[in-house]
Image (cartoon, rainbow, N blue to C red):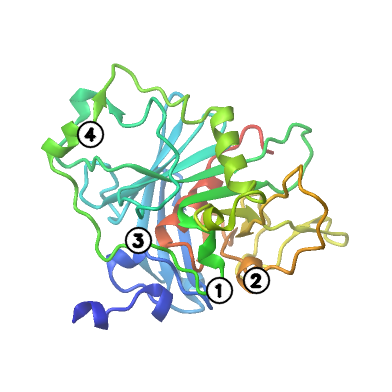
Amino acid sequence: MCKEIVRTPESCGKLTFPVSLKQPGPRDVTIQCFIKRDKSNLTYHLYLCLSPAALLVENGKFLLSAKRTRRTTCTEYVISMDAENISRSSNTYIGKLRSNFLGTKFLIYDTQPPHSGANIPAPGRSSRRFYSKKVSPKVPSGSYNIAHITYELNVLGTRGPRRMHCVMHSIPASALEPGGTVPGQPDHLLPPRSLEDSFRSMSFSKSLDYSTEFSSSRFSEIMGAAMGTANVPDSERSKMPLVLKNKSPRWHEQLQCWCLNFRGRVTIASVKNFQLIAAQPAAGPSQPPHPPPPPPPPDHDKVILQFGKVGKDMFTMDYRYPLSAFQAFAICLSSFDTKLACE
């Protein structure tokens, strides 16, 4: 009876229970949120806007939090459902974001397993390696790579907006087609696994090496496979992951800056601001000439996620189907990370 009464955000447009944070947002409207950054302790808190003036009075319902940790070769953002206890040892830990040293490549990890047909890349050598002394019964051993995020290198050093792509391995591209859905939506959040199960699924190493996870060839292979679907049979194309890209801004001559229409939700120009739309597959190099393809479906033109600055440490985050609040928050966290070679 409860499942019949409690509807998903996709159908009701509201975040009701904690599991809603990992379910896709509504199709026709966006869920408006804001992020508060605290530089003193490197934390980020996501809130649901409760009113149009929520940003002015900082009035919102707490949803998620994240804490940034800088390591020797990477940066990690631990994501939690608790506003204060933000750690992997907490039972409110639900995933993380990890970047390479330059802040140009990111991986999103989820504690929930994706649907059985998800196009998840094979793990690298460093996957699931931990210090044996750090293993805790409370640490969730489920760590599923659900997305790759890349920011293009600015080799010319020219000023301009960042260019980014997101490969959402847990969301098929067919989700945006008419009648499409996101398979394997969770109806509950999984509790942390037992210590016995954790030992079964872990291998131990004296050191952690994330280099294979962020190798250029690995990312190029994943991105190329996701984007180059022109020669893929229709039966297989529906299984390809959804790829998101940033919407290209326009240069405003009078303002002398790059501009996007955020419909009043962003008020301060920043290199961190972005809008994500669905990317169209690249054409195959050996294809014979064809007539121009039909215009993309309406869902491909809609802004799926937008993020922008409204104050010194205040940012808006608006998302819609097929992203969940957790996925949208993780993508936005990647924009906070310093990008030494992108700007």
Labels 3 and 2: the sequence-earlier one: 3
Mark 1, secondary structure of its residue: loop
Distance CA(mark 3)–CA(mark 4): 22 Å
| Disc 1: which residue | 178
Label 1 and label 2: CA atoms lie apart by 8 Å
Q: Quadrant of residue 60?
A: bottom left
Residue drawn 56% across the image and 64% down it: 304
Around disc 1, counting alpha carbons within 10 Å, would you say few (fewer than 14), some (14 to 19), or many (20 or more)?
Answer: few
Residue holding disc 4: 201
Residues under numbered marks 1 and 4 in contact, where contact means CB atoms less than 8 Å apart: no
Q: In the image, what residue occupies the spot 63% across and 69% down?
A: 302
In this image, 65 relative to 308: left or right?
A: left
Q: Secondary structure at mark 3?
A: loop
Residue ID for mark 2? 297
Discs 1, 2 touching: Cβ within 8 Å:
yes
Depth check, front residue: 57 or 278: 278
Q: Are marks 4 and 2 in contact (CB under 8 Å)?
A: no
Residue 169 lies, in percent from the top left, at 47, 49
Residue type beneath disc 3: Gly
Hey, what amino acid is under mark 4?
A: Ser
Which percent across, then down, holds residue 226?
58, 46
Q: Are dots 1 and 3 in contact, CB under 8 Å?
A: no
Which residue occupies 38% across, 65% down? 23
Characterize the local packing of mark 2: few (<14), some (14-19) or many (20 or more) Cα atoms within 10 angstroms.
few
3D distance between C-alphas at marks 1 and 3: 18 Å
Q: Which of the two discs, 3 and 4, labels the residue nearer the N terminus?
A: 3
Residue 103 appears in the rendering: no
Label 3 neighbour load within 10 Å: few <14, some 14-19, many 20+: some
Amino acid under label 2? Pro
Percent x, y for residue 295? 73, 69
Decide: few, some or many residues near mark 4? Use Cα within 10 Å; few <14, some 14-19, many ≥20.
few
Which mark is first along the chain, 2 or 4?
Answer: 4
